Amino acid sequence: MLPRDLVSAVGRVDPAQAPERTADPRQQAFQRAVAPLLGKAIHGEVLAKLTDGSFVVKVADVPARMQLPPGAQVGADVPLTLVSLQPRATFQVGAQATTAFSEAGPPLPDGADPSKAPLAYREGSPVGRAAALLAQAGANATQAFAAGAEANATRLSPTGQAIANVLAAAGKAETPMAGLVGRAPVVAGPSLDSGAIAQGLQQAVGKSGLFYESHVAEWAQGARPLAELAGEPQQQAAREGARPVLTDPATAQFVNLQLATQEQAQIAWQGQLWPGQPMEWEVRREDDGDGDAAQDPEQAAWHSRLRLRFPELGELDATLSFVNGALQVRFAAGSEDSAALLRRHAPELATALEAAGTRLQGFEARAVEAGDE
């Protein structure tokens, strides 16, 4: 028998902690796989469509998630050009620059059980790395561990479980929510007042409820008046005595959209620019990977896309990239006449932008066939 004083001197041994991961190895593997393709034209195979409107595309035999132009179909072949690797692999898809990043596992073999598909492949599943991990953790938390008291005691925190439940409810919605839907026109009528249109778009997004929690935090810190919260849907519902049920699919989808917006730094909006004039608008922020853009928006690259149909110009798709104070504009018009008209007025656009303090670095206007991008 060991001496008592020797036994009492033995301290408790804590379990070893797993080393903190500094980067997603799948993302690193994807970047290594496509690095030799930088600047080259390649092809990707569309494997699946996700509920936020993004797609899983096989590039260099590696599945990656990316945004594709409207009309993309599962099973189609898409032409891609790899234009950069950092901070995430960025591909040019037609007239659109879209960021692709590796998220899902390999595709299922033919005839395999879809219930065993990687989470991000399942139609109706939450989208986004944080959402996927939380939802998977919520599923795992309901399963009994194989053995061991410590393993059986492992579970999500109440907050984590609540978010996992919300994301699971979002996956049950019949109609996926891919972006904000404007309930009222941005401006009252046809207008050339760019300031009024910009303010209207700011109001449409700012009061959509997408950033309600951050606005409440600003109010609590004295940085935002309470009156500004009154126009947001959460406040309107509260005045009517309604309490949101987080596991309701519609509410859960909105929470999922909030999480995806924060994670991807991207917003999609569709509505009426003015009565009878529909518009689709996407805006995405891309920083340089060192975190400075989160503190200073001037350090970020901003990409925006507008889709409209005008009585004279017809279908018009505009892609804008704003980097270091300079703007690049690309138009895809429904006819060569419309594209030629836009090119003739490019000098006027450059002059107007210069007067506003923005340099027009690039301009392109081309005609596209119906259904092309």
Image: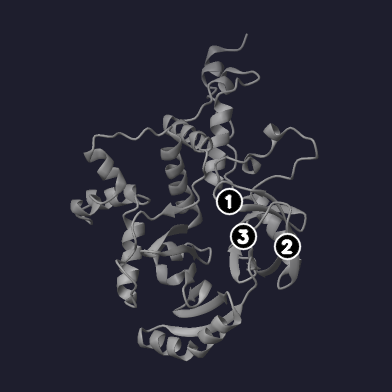
> Which amino acid type is marked by label 3?
Leu
Q: Residue 368 versus residue 219: which sits nearer the camera?
A: 368
Residue visible at 65% across and 68% down in the picture: 372
Q: Residue at x 57, y 40 (%)?
A: 125
Direction from residue 229 to residue 112 in the image, left or right: right
Residue ID for mark 3 = 68
Q: Say if 92 sits above or below 136 in the image.
A: below
Q: Nearer the viewer, residue 298 or 273?
A: 273
Q: CA distance from mark 2 to mark 3?
A: 18 Å
Residue 319: % across, % down: 53, 72
**Residue 22, labelled with which disc?**
1
- Give the side of residue 33 with respect to residue 183, left or right: right
Q: Around disc 2, counting alpha carbons within 10 Å, would you say few (fewer than 14), some (14 to 19), or many (20 or more)?
A: some
Q: Which residue is mark 2?
A: 34
Q: Is residue 302 visible?
A: no
Residue 308 spot, x, y in % from top left:
48, 68
Helix, strand or loop under label 1: loop
> In x, y percent, where is residue 217?
28, 49
Residue 104 in picture, x, y percent from top left: 66, 46
Looking at the image, is 126 positioned above or below residue 182? above
